[in-house]
Every structure is written in C-alpha cells, then in structure tokens.
Amino acid sequence: MYSRWYKTLVTVPPLAWVILFLVLPYLLLFSYSFFSVRSGTIVHHGTLANYSTLLHNPMYVSVLLRSLRIAAIVTVLSLLLAFPLAYYVSFHAGRRKDVLYQLVIIPLWVSYLVRAYAWKTILGGGGVLNALLQHLGFSPASFLLYSPFAVVLTLTHIYTPFAFLPLYASLEHIPRSLIEASTDLGASSWRTVRTVVLPLALPGAIAGATFAFVLSLGDFLAPLLVGGPSGLMISNVVVSLFGAAYDWPLGAAVSLCMLLLVLAIVFAAGRLEKRYGLS
Amino acid sequence: MLEVRAVSKSFGATPVLRSVSLSVARGEFLTILGESGSGKTTLLRIAAGFERPGEGEVWMDGTRIDTLPPNRRPLNTVFQHYALFPHLSVFENVAYGLRASRAPRADIALRVEQALEQVHLTGLDTRKPSQLSGGQQQRVALARALVNHPRVLLLDEPLSALDATMRRRMQGELKALQREIGISFVLVTHDQEEAMALSDRIALLHAGTLEQIDTPAALYRHPRTAYAAEFIGRTNLLRGLVRNHTATAGPFIWPLDSPDGEALFSLRPEHIRFSSAGAPPGAVRFEASVADRLFQGSAVLLTLQCPGGLRLTARVPDPAPPAGAHSFEFTPDDVVRIPVPAG
Amino acid sequence: MTAPLPASRAPRWLTLFAFAVFLFLYAPILTLIVYSFNGSSVGGFPPANWTLHWYRLLASDDALWSAVLNSLAVASAAVVLSLALGLPAALAFDRASFPGKALFRRLVLLPLILPGVITGLSLLMLFATSGLKLSLFTVGLGHGTALISVAATEIYAGLQKMDRRLEEASLDLGATQWRTFWRVTVPSLALPLLAAALLVFTLSMDEIAVSFFLVGRDNTLPLEIWSRLRRGITPEINAISTVVFAFSLAAVLLWYRIRRLGPAESSL
C-alpha cells in the first residue's frame, strides 16, 4: 500500500543519521582502541598495547569485577523489591492502582542527579542519618558514605523502578481467569504465585533484570557522588582516562570492552526472554 | 465496467484467491458473498488498491487500474467499521476527498450538503464521529464515499456493526440509494439473506474460488455446486445415479432427461409436502416418520426418517400434524441435479 | 491495561512491604525537600529555623539561570531532532522492509540500553575527528541522537494502536500519500508525538553522561549542579533540587494524562 517513495523517504533519513552519528562513532571508538599516546599526542598507529594493559594491570580487572559484582547485587535487590511491589499494585491495589503505578514511575522522571545527591545528604558524615543517630544518642557511623555499600544502596534506589516497569507489564498481561482457575482447582495463593504468576512473569523479570544490570553497570554518577575511592566503577575509569589522564586510546579500549559486555548481556537476555516467553 | 481478470493472491504460502474473474455491469448491485476466509475482503481490497494482485489484472472502462495507487482509482470504499477520521468533523470527513482533489471551495460546501441530504443526515455537520450513533456513522461513511461521484462504490461488510433492526432498515435505504444514483455497488458480506435481498447478482466465493455468479433467484433455484446449494438457504443433498433417463437417489426413483452418470441432487425443504389428492402427476410419494420438529413461526421444520435410514428436512406450513408416520411427496421438477465434484 | 478490579485483600506483610518500598523510593527526595527549608547550613536533626533563604539565593543566582536557559535550548533542540528522525524511523520499523532492517532497528534503540558514557565519548571522538568545536550545539546534537530511541519507541507504540483503515480511507478518497501523511497519519499520532516530546524534553533536561563529554564553555543545568556538588553540600542545592523535582513531577503527570487520553500503553 505504501509506495516505494514513501518507504524510501521514511527509511533513508534516520538510517543515514544513525550511520553518521551512531555507527561511525562506534567505529571510531573501535579504531581509537588500537592507537596509543606518546608525549601528549595520539599516535594513529595500530597496536594491541591497550588491550594488553587491560589484561595485565590488576587495577582494571579488579574495577571491572567490582562493577560486575555491584551491578549483580543491585539487580537482585531491585528484583526483590520490584516483584512484590508490582504484584501488589497489579493484583491488590484495586482502585488505587493507577495512582500507585504513577507513584512508582514518578521517581524515574525525577532528576537522576537529584536522587543520587539525596543519598549523599542522607548518608554523609554530617548528614541526616548520622544527625538522627546522634539525636537518638548513638555514635555516628562513618562507614555509610564513600563505600560500595552506599553505591549499591543508591543504584538500587535508582533502578528499582526500571525493574518494576516490565515486571508490572507482564503481570498485567496475565489473564485474571488463570488466577481464578488456579484457586478454583484448590491451589493456595502462595502456590498460585509460584506455579502460575511467577512463570508467566518470567519474561518481564528477565527484561527488568537486564535493565537494572546494564544501566547500573555503566553508571558513573552514583559512584563519584557516594562511592569514594573504594566504590569507583568502570565508567569512572573511562571518564578519568578521557579527562585528566588524557589517554583516549586506553579509554576507548575500556569502553569497547564495556560495550561488548553490554551487547552480550542484552543478546543473552533476549534469548532467555524468547525461551521463557509464551510462544 | 469494473472487471477482475483471473486474479490470484497468496499471503505467504497460503493461497487466498485462485484465478477469480468477474465483471460488474453499469448500475449493477453486485454482492460478493462468502464465509470468513473465503477471500472476499481480499478481492475487494485488490479492487480498491490496498493489495496488489499476485496474478491477474483489474480493469475499469477499458483502462487497466491494478497498477494505479488507490488514490488514483475512480472508485471509493465504505469501510468495515467505517474508518471515519476521528479528528475531523462530519463535514470535514465528507469534504475530505473533495479537498484532496482541490475542488473549488463553494463547490465543496454544496456537494457535502447534498451528499449528507442523500443519506438523510443533516444538521450534524460539526459533530465528531465519536458523537454519532452507529447508524449515523454508517451514513457519514456512505456520504464521504458518494460525494466524490465514484463510478463504482465498494462496500466492505458495511452493516455488520449494526444491530438487527438497524441493519434491516439500512439494507432498505442502501438499495433505494443505489437505485436513485444509479452507480454500481459492489458489496462484500457473509450474510446470505442480505445478499439475496439487495443484489442484482451474487458472486459466491468459497476458499478463494468463485463458485457461481448469478441472480439471487437463479443461485437459489439452480445451484451449480454442492457448496452453493448448501450455503444459499437449506437443502437436502442426495447422492445418486442417472441411467437410461431415470434418476435414482436413496429410495426415490423418477424420470429425468439428463446424461448418464453419478449425480448429486438438491431438494429444498419447502419442496417436500404432505401428500394430497390433488398432487400433480408424476409426484414422488414416500412414507416417513417425523423424528424432530423445529418451530419457525410461519412454518415448521421437520426432520423426516425415511425408509432405508435416509433423513430429510421438510418445511411445511404451521400447524403441522402430530408426530408419527405420514405420507409425503415432492415434484421431480423441483430437484436440481448438481455435477459430482471430481475426486 | 485491564480495568481496575475490586481489590482482593492482600496479605498484611505484602502491604507493609509495598509501603516500605514506596518509603525507600520517596524518603530521600522528601528529605531533600524538607532540608531545603532548613535554616542551619550544616544539616543536623531535627531540621530547625524554617526559612526561604535558599530559594531567595536561587532567584538571584545568574550562573544558575543561564544554565537553565542553556538546558532549555538544548532540550528544545533535542525534541525537534528526535521527533524529526524518530517519526520516520518508527514508520520505517512499521512499514518498510529492507535487508538489515532488524539491525537498523537495534542500532536506533541501542542508546536506550548503552551506558550514556559510551554514547557521549564516541560522539566526542566524532566531533574531535571532524574538527567540530564543542558547544551547546554539540550537546543538543548528542541528546537528539541518543533520544531518537525514546521518540521512536513511543511513536511506534502509537502506530501499533492506530487504525490502519484510516490511511486506506484517505487514499481511497483520492488523497496522495503526502497528503495522507499530514492529514491523517500525523493527526492520528498527535498524542504519542506529544508524549514523546515531553519525555524527550524531560530526559534531556536531566541528561548528564552525554553532556559531560560534549559540553563546551556553557554549562547545562545538571552539569552546573554537578560542578557545585563537587565543591560541597550546600542547602542551596537542596532548593535547586526541590525546584527541579517540582518541574519533573509536573512533566510526568502531564505525560501520564496524555497517555491516558490515547489508547497507547506503556512501552518503556
């Protein structure tokens, strides 16, 4: 029904734009990762030195492992918070359903920076939590801010709504007659959740987990704000290599590894989702 | 004027239309009748230009049109569920085609008003489609198509969204409108009663094949396939033989001038009646017991248990005699021979 | 979305748990708001000496206001750019077929899941290589490009809900494809387009990772806040945050209303 002209006109501009402003930059990233820096200028000459640095300098490996660990913990925590919440809103909220749904997505829109910063004011040495502790007669706790713990807490706060959205959508798509059928057949509500709701919500859980994992893995603000030196993550390394350290090629190599890691995770999640989704 | 020539169409590996040919005469009301999945809507969409034929051509008044985009074809469509533009008023919906063809401004207002009058819908110009009843939306859809003076109007199940009373009323109006403006209407429907009531001719489509194209009466009286016989009205299909000018089917034997061979016979329920003294000569008589009865208002539908295990359906006037064995008869002239399908 | 059902009674622990999660999501923001009215500049508990002092400071903060204006300009540019490319992209997803379409689609949506840092620095390399000077212009270019993904997703969801027969009716009535596009397709997509614009605008106003790499001398609002944060916590930042929060809240409520007007379902 749509003419060849029409199809060409809607395809070519975005395609050209994407090639120019997404594909080309990624290719540049790729090629930069084989360059090197000598006395403050970038040498456009192929070398694998950057990748060998990544492998042999324990700093990079340990930051990457720490990032993966933090992202994994954040993912698990987000799911543990988001699933009961989504279940509650979808199945038990009744008339308040819309309001509660909005209450979960509002934080998604509210300045990311503001929310990360809020944790800094709460956890900090002179912060609200310590002031409260003192007010109640306890001694202030210094481990709160500038630790991996603070990073995990902040990222979980930020990415729980991301995990919530696909979970909620998949719960909403479960026909209520299935729940009724399960109850009718004598299953307890716990059993119904385990044997009907959870399996059907699995694709949503996978999508939610992917969002939480990938986004927290690449985060660079929260670690800088609340992480301190022991809470730095892989993106912070990239930022410092592109900034103060002025080693773009090494930074490009780190980014490229991160990019491939993210793509692999998304690809694997897509496969899983397909496998557990309703065919 | 509109002519479909050997059109075939497949969606993926599924054939939807198999070499369908038909032509619509000037001022004719032609109905494409078929069950869902028969390909009738696809045929209409090919004529309108929303689908391309896989093979075959579409012609109109000596011009080939299947290569033209829909906006350059001299026909208009009334869509199923109407497809009225929700963001435009009734007036703007009807004026849409005129504006697209850059008709003069003064002309537009006049023609829109005329079209709306034609479908008996005035005073609602500024309403939005969502503020109209189903019947009113139907009228807007008609006016929106007719205002462009198409040479052929295509109607895709236009009445299916209406309730039974409204549908009967619109059927009457549709027929009157078509007579009044005198252009060809091509209607797609799955409702055989609607097709019988409205059409000059009916094209019966089954599994992508054109079974028969005929006037409603001819289609009813002389079905050429078993499918046509069973789809149009109710019938008793009897398997039998013709040999030496004699037809045999189950327990019945009657003289028939027809070539020898296997045959299917269609005997309409209303052609079976209780035997009477004044039966025409040559009537076939038989004894049967009434196994079941279905009250239908003016008539009763009887299930007859005949000798040899054969079951027939008969339609007799109410009140019918009580259950039990009775004598029935039919006239051989009312039996239609249908060729046995190959295989 | 299913019609609201009568609430079946939830187990008490579940209700409490849900309440606790809401508390976790909102407590930090509420704390910020409360402390933006706190008279003492070092925090402490409980907050004391309620004041509007920090808001008055804001009103006369020229650097902050110019950052706000910069962000508004960048966000507007991002909206125009992402819609101008996101609409055809969504139409192409829906209607065109060409080799590599699946790949094209993934590429468009990639910035949704890729860390902003990577999008930002790869664009930085492009601009550095092509000799384009960093400025608000490059930030807008970056935001617009990254957010095509959001616009296309939102518009595509709207297209799926759109009645295809409307376009057929338009063509049937003799309108050209061009006319059909402007008179039927775009008006039918008005709500998704509006929702997409609002979403892109808000995300751009808040964006920091891409801006971080592409910004020139003029700061955007988040970067301005960021640079002040690094100098230390002041209640003035609480006040800024509260104002930003109020605006985001208004935006999300508006967006949600637009969504509810149309049949579009959440896609993000």
Image (tube, grey):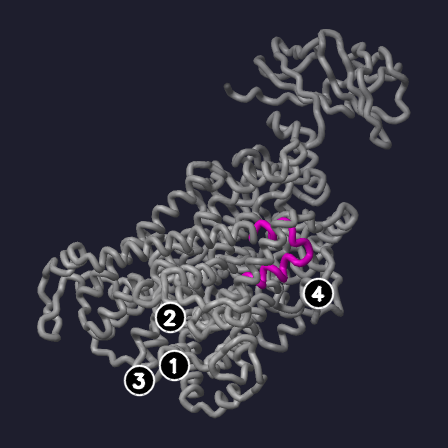
Q: Position of residue C192 (x, y in %)?
A: 52, 65
Which residue is the site of mark 4? B116
Task: Residue at 53% x, 69% y: name it.
Answer: A137
CA–CA distance in space, label 4 to label 1? 67 Å
Query: What x and y, as percent, mark residue C226?
Result: 38, 77
SS state under label 1: helix
Given the image, what chain letter belongs to the residue carrying mark 2?
A: A
Which mark is in front, 4 or 1? 1
Q: Which residues are magenta?
A: A86-104
Q: Quadrant of residue A214?
A: bottom left
Q: Please name the residue that numbered disc 1 is placed on.
A: C228
Which residue is tagged 3? Answer: C217
Q: Which amino acid, mark 3? A: Arg
> Chain for mark 3?
C
- The residue identified by callout 2 is A225
Give me the C-alpha separation between circle 2 and circle 3.
23 Å
Q: Where residue C253 appears, x then y in whole percent?
A: 58, 69
- The answer to whether C180 appears left or right of B223 in the picture is left
Q: Closer to the camera, A194 or A176?
A: A194
